[in-house]
Amino acid sequence: MLVKICGATSAAEVRGVADAGADLVGLWHGVPGGRADLPAGRLADLTAEARATGRLEAVLVTFATDVEALAGLTGAGGPSWIQLHGYQPPGTVRALRALVPDGVRIVKVLHVDGGSCVEARLIGAYERAGADCFLLDAVAAGGRVGSTGASLDDGTVTGLADRMQRPFLLAGGLGAGNRHRFAGTRAHPRFLGIDVDSAARGEDGLLAAGSAAAVTRAWRAA
């Protein structure tokens, strides 16, 4: 099971994510107004830091739609994953797939508002366009998306997963204490792992190795 810790902004946080036993570190770029948004140069620096840990892969988390710019960030040692965390259409995924280097994985976020998924009818189109996997996340009050802390229902997750041919990651208010709420999700054959932000942070708001490790241990428990 993969563990992704999202929203690192410093080398110390990246190293802490690695020490926590995670597999992926999320680096924001092209997230206007986002508290963890990074300029391109800083994105490159932290991607190199992740690679230097010997265990982490960097995930470019973005709301952007400029596929040429995004593809350019993944070349020459850039992030090996791109997470499209917005309402980009299948055409954006198709264009991006044609431009990114071989081996770069494209993750398309599917936004769940209550019991319904905004992009449910497009799942097949995203798969045909070249999405490697999906990430299921909750839409918060007012339509806010991304690191909202809002949680999903296990049955809603598995129902969406049954419509997919690709693996999926689960996000949305996950922590060390709520693994038991997602028994169906964890048993699903296409379950790939989890994506955590808030629960991996300390009281100062920064990613903390101890907090991230607690989540990782809990979700990987037999």
Image (spheres, helix red, strand yellow):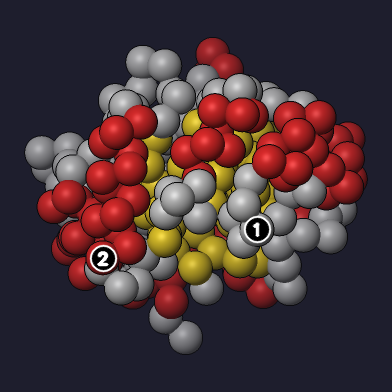
Residue depicted at x 25% and y 68%: 53
Circle 2 sits on which residue? 52
Q: Which residue is drawn at 88% across and 47% down?
A: 128
Relative to residue 206, is residue 30 depicted above or below?
A: above
What type is the residue that disc 2 sits on? Ala
In the image, residue 70 lies at what x, y percent? 55, 33
Residue at image mark 1: 102
What crowding class fits label 1: few (fewer than 14 Cα within 10 Å), some (14-19), or many (20 or more)? few
Tell me which corner region of the image, top left, top right, bottom left or bottom right, holds residue 137.
top right
The three-letter amino acid code for the residue at tag 1 is Asp
Residue drawn at x 69%, y 26% is 88
Residue closer to the observer: 15 or 40: 40
Work out whether mark 2 precedes mark 1 in sequence or the reverse, and give the earlier one: 2
Identify whether 50 is placed above or below 109: below
Callout 2 crowding tier (Cα within 10 Å): few <14, some 14–19, many ≥20: few
Between 151 and 59, the one nearer to me in the picture: 59
Query: Is 203 rendered above or below residue 39?
Result: below
Estimate the x, y position of residue 81 in percent, counting from the top left. 53, 52
